[in-house]
Structure formats: C-alpha cells, structure tokens
Image (tube, rainbow, N blue to C red):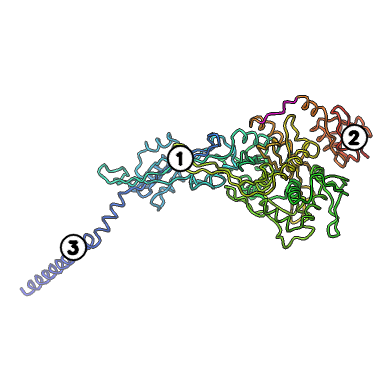
Amino acid sequence: MAERIKTNLKSRKRIILVFGIMALLLILLLFRMAWIQVVRGGEYSDMAKDQQKRDIPIAAKRGSIYDRNGEELASSATCYTLWIRPSQVRENYTGDKLTEVANRISVVLGVESDEILNLLKSDKVLVKAAKYLEKDTADKLSDLDISGLEITEDTKRFYPMKSFAANLLGSVNDEGEGRSGIEYQYNEYLSGTTGRAVIEADVNGNQLSNGNSKYYEAKDGLNVELTIDEVLQHYLENAVSTGIKKTGAERVSGIVMDPKTGEILAMATNPTFDPNDPTKPVGEDALKTYNKLSNSKKSEYLNRMWGNSLVSDVYEPGSTFKLLTSSSSLEEGLVTPDTPFYCKGYYEVSGLKIFDAERKPHGAETLTQAVGQSCNPVHMQLALNMGKNTFYKHLKLFGMTEKTGIDYPGESNPIVTDEGNVGPLELASMGFGQGIAITPMQLITAVSAIGNDGVMMKPHFVRKLTDKDGKTVVEFKPTKVRKVLSSETCEEMLNIMEQQVDKYGGRTAKMPGYRIGGKTGTSSKAVNGSYSQSKTDTSFICMAPIDNPKIVVLIVCNSPNQYFADITAIPIAKDFLTKALPYLNVKAADDLKENSEKQKNAYVPDLTNYTYKKAKEVLKEYGLKYEVRPALSEDEKKDEDLDFTIVDQYPKAGKKIDTKEIIYLYRK
C-alpha cells in the first residue's frame, strides 16, 4: 500500500512538472507574441510591405545630337534590360530545376548557362542580367513566365553615321553616361533625370490590383545642336582619310573655323573609330596595325584613337607661328611689309649660329618675301627686335599662354617658358615657332583673328540646347575674346598670306579663280628630350576667300613620310577647299582670261638640295616638266628606287615660266 502511495505521488509530481513547463512555455510564447505585435509590430509590418514593393527604374531618354542643319548624329533607341531577383527565383526553383531555369534563360539570351546560374545563386537582392535587348528577345523572356525576372524599358545610344565625327561626338559608357567628347562635355544636359515606379506586388512579382503604386516620371534630356556642318564634315573627313594614305602619317587631323563667329564648322582625325563599336579601329590599314600590337600597346592605341589631338595634344607649330610673329611686329610699327632684310642662311644669337631649315641663304628679301620663303633668320630678328616683354605681350593677346576655353573636355595647357627664364636663344627660337608648344585649336583661334579685322573669337562646338519639341532652352552666342590686331595690320597680313600661296611655299594650294592665303609649317618632333632627326609634324593653315574670309582651315600631319608641308598638308587642305568653297557659295573669279593665264604660267619652285624623288613629286604637283643633267641612262630610267640630291636647277627658283617650259635638274 505504501509503495502504491509512493508511486502515485511521483506521478503527480511528474504531471505537475510537465504542466509547469508547459505553462512556462505558454507564458514565453505569449510574451513573444506580445513583443512582436506590440513592441516590434510596426517594424515587421513595414518589412512585410517592403517585401511586397518593387522599385523599378524608368530610364530617361538621352537627348539627341544634331549638326547645325538638323541632321541627326547621335540618338537613343528603345531597348530592354533584364533584371533578376535571385532569392525570389530560388523560392520556386532549387537544385536541378534551378539549373533548368538557367538553361532556358541562357538560350534566349545566347550566353553560357553557367553565367546565368551564377546570377541566380547571387546573394544580391537585384542583379542586372542583360541590357540592350531587342523587343523580340524581351518578349521571349516574358513568355518564359519565371517568377523573379523583371524586364524594364531602357535606351541605347546609337550613332547612325558610324565613324562620322566620332572624335568630336565621343561616346557613352555602359550606363549610358557620356565618356568622352561632346557626350561627356554636355552629359548634364543630355542625360535627363531617371524616373521610378514603386509598386506593390505578390510573391511572383505581379502588381497587386488593390496595391498602392507611385510613379516618378523620367525627365528626358535636352538635344544638342552643334556648330558642325554635316556636308563640310564629310568633305574634311574624306580629305583627311585620303591624306593619311598618301602621306603615310601616323595621324592626320583638320579643323575648319568660321573666323567671324568662332564656330567650328568641321573637325576630323584619322585614325578614328565607330562609337557604336569603339574598340575597333576604322579602316583595313588601321585595323591591321592595331591587331599586330601587344595588349599594352593596344590600350595606348585606343586611348589615342578615342582622344582629340586638336584640343588635347600640344605640338610645336613651326613656321605657321611666323604669322603671329610677323603680325606682332607690324602691329608694333617695327616693320612694314616692304622692310628689307638680308638672310645669310643663319642668324647669330649669343655667339651661336642658328641656321635656316634648308641651311642656305635667301639673300636680300622684304618681310613679305621672308614670310613667303619661311625664313627663320628674319623671324629670329623680328622676335629679338621686339624684345621679350613686347613679344610676350602679344603671346598673351593671341592666347598662347592659356587654354582657349572651348566647350570640349581635356583641353591641354600650352607649354610656354616663363618670361623671366627666357634668354635671347629662347626668344629667337620662339620667333619661328620652335621652343613653344600649343594646341592646334589655339593656333587656328589666334590666326583667325587676322581674318576677322583683328578680333579673336572664342571657339565653340555647340549653338544651342533644345527640348523634345524643338524649343530653344539655352543659346550659345558668339563670344569676342579681345581685339588683338588693328585693321591695317590685318589687311597687310592677308596680303602677305596671299603672296605665300601665289608665289612661294604655298603655291600647291592655288586654285584657279579663288583667292587663298596661308602659311606652311614643319617642325621637328621632340623625342626623349631632344629633337628627332627623322620625325616631323607638317601643317598648313589657310583662309578663303582672302578678301573676306569665310573659313579658316588647319591641317596637321603627324610624322608623315615626307618632310615638307607642300606635299603633305597642302594637298589635303586643297582637296577640302575644292569642294567646300562652291558649297559655301564662294564664287570663282569670272575673268576666264586671267584664270587661263594663271594656268598657263607658273613660278619655278626651289628644288636644290631636294632628293630626286621629292623633286619629282613637287614638279608633278605644279604640273611642270623636267629633265635631269647629266641625263639618266636607260637603266636608271627603269630603276624605281633611283634617288640622288639635286645640286642645282635652271631656271632658278621664283622665275615665272610657261608651264610648257622644261626645268633642268642638275646632279653630281
């Protein structure tokens, strides 16, 4: 009996213990429920709502870029982006089924299945799986009916004319933001403001019919209207493309400016690229060169190709700079166009003889002739006679010591020796365009003042910004920088420039019926701190018509296979002008007799010290006949590699002859 009572007591204790534990657990559960609902109820409620929300970006349409006449150069086309919510996909698909889903998606996208599978396994809330999808592809993805896939409308940048004006327009990055050129400079206006769609959705991502939705409308970007003329741009690009093939240059570039407004009417560089496919050089020759490079060299090549050397690279302008030295001396009243000089082939500065480029004397000459014959000794004298204070005053007036401020990214600062560190040698060298490094944009901006009654204009690429309805939002009007020359000096310089083309080193630029003025330039390239004996930059700057310039043209050839600008840069400029002047309604002279006389007669070029090959090229450009003395043997006539130095000629350089006459070239 006692044992039985004992057993019952133990059973009761166990029951009480069990009920006690259960009561304790119930109390804890009630406490936890109260904690969740009362203390953190609001927080969990917000979390639940957040899980139902879908925040979807709405892309703004990037503004288009047009030329001055409304031709579309860059636009944005509608495309689609695939987004994946990995955790949501994994809620419905695991293991082999997840792999199967990855396969289905990859087939539509045309990518590796593993690539998609890795995205599906991601810990991120939302991942971008594919972009720039066509509507057909987007529809196929929607038809897969996979929970966790979201497709949004987006835009893709498109350049309908491919490589046309590529270095000017630039390109955009993967996010559609400007990466270079005008796309980068005006990105703030072009890009617009991205919108958002915040919706409440079910577990499958479908919008709830009774859910709350908020839409923040995207604001489209503004359109950019350039100063560029599409027709002139085509003419320049064709001329530059032909020029790089003929000259064998590493790069050929050109700018065309309206001297009255500072508007850039055309700008071209070759090699170039297609911004639709920016990592592939345009042209078979350029592509072959690129494919032979190492990976590191390819990177360098692409960076140079994407850049715009006319704005971002400095170079020594050489003899084209003599226009600034001469005009400054005229402006100061130190010389006149007829001031006499005597060139001995060199000029002695601080006990050092600095020779002319061709190391031979020009003899007696006026300032006009010195510019025409590109005489270094005379321009050294001009700089030294001005003195460094006056010379630097004009450098600053012409903008040689500062950026132009053009509306384009990456403009380089000029490299000009501090005035306090300039001695006679440095000053003399700068007088003929050596020892000073500027951008081509600086040079054409300064020289353009000669064609605008001495007023220098600020160069610019953009005329205005417009909205989607074509309404002007911002207009950029021509800006005067300052007056740098008097009207009298400009008139004298225009005449000097015309003489350079009519009688001297720029003769190959002559065009029947048109009045053109210009100046050639050749400068040695600086390599590892010293001047190269083999690499040069040749250039030609000109304006037309010279009596009332409508355009100024600058052509620069980097490292061509010929030394002189008259057979490298000038033919490129002439190729452009031949088409551009009629397009601009610049009428050729009506005096057919005068034109006929010009075609029948020519001035003899200076061929002494030229190689036979170069002399032949120059004479071909002038349309002149020649004979070699001593006469060539039959074997020599057949030898295409035959070359020698011309030691003398008849008639002498500068003599006016009938084009039917023979020029005799003498060799040793």
User: Looking at this rendering, what residue extends furthest in the left direction?
Assistant: 1
Quadrant containing the N terminus in the rendered view:
bottom left
Around disc 1, counting alpha carbons within 10 Å, would you say few (fewer than 14), some (14 to 19), or many (20 or more)? Answer: some
Q: Position of residue 520 (x, y in %)?
A: 75, 42
Give me the disc on residue 31.
none
The relative height of residue 516 versus residue 197 in the rendered view (above or below) is: above
Please state the horizontal and vertical placement of residue 594, each as a whole percent of the image: 78, 27
Residue for badge 3 = 30
Q: Are marks 1 and 3 in contact (CB under 8 Å)?
A: no
- Residue that mark 2 sits on: 651
Q: Is residue 517 left or right of residue 357?
A: left
Residue 648 percent coordinates (x, y): 91, 39
- N-terminal-most mark, 3 or 2: 3
Q: Going from the N terminus, do you reach mark 2 or mark 1 first?
A: 1
Q: Is residue 107 visible?
A: no
- Region of the chain picked out in magenta, as a range: 586-591
What kind of element bears circle 3? helix
The residue positioned farthest toward the top in the image shown: 592
C-alpha distance separating marks 2 and 1 = 65 Å
Q: Residue at x 75, y 29 (%)?
A: 512
Question: Which residue corresponds to mark 1?
Answer: 467
Q: Residues within 10 Å of mark 2 (few under 14, many from 20)?
A: some
Q: Nearer the viewer, residue 420 or 590?
A: 590
Task: Report if residue 94 is visible in the image.
Answer: yes
Q: Is residue 588 magenta?
A: yes
Q: CA distance from mark 1 to mark 3?
A: 63 Å
**Looking at the picture, which amino acid does disc 3 mark?**
Leu
Please give the name of the residue rendered at 30% of the width and 49% of the height, measured from the top-left corner.
52
Depth check: 642 or 145 in front?
A: 642
Mark 1 is on which residue type?
Asp
Mark 1 vs mark 3, foreground winner is 1
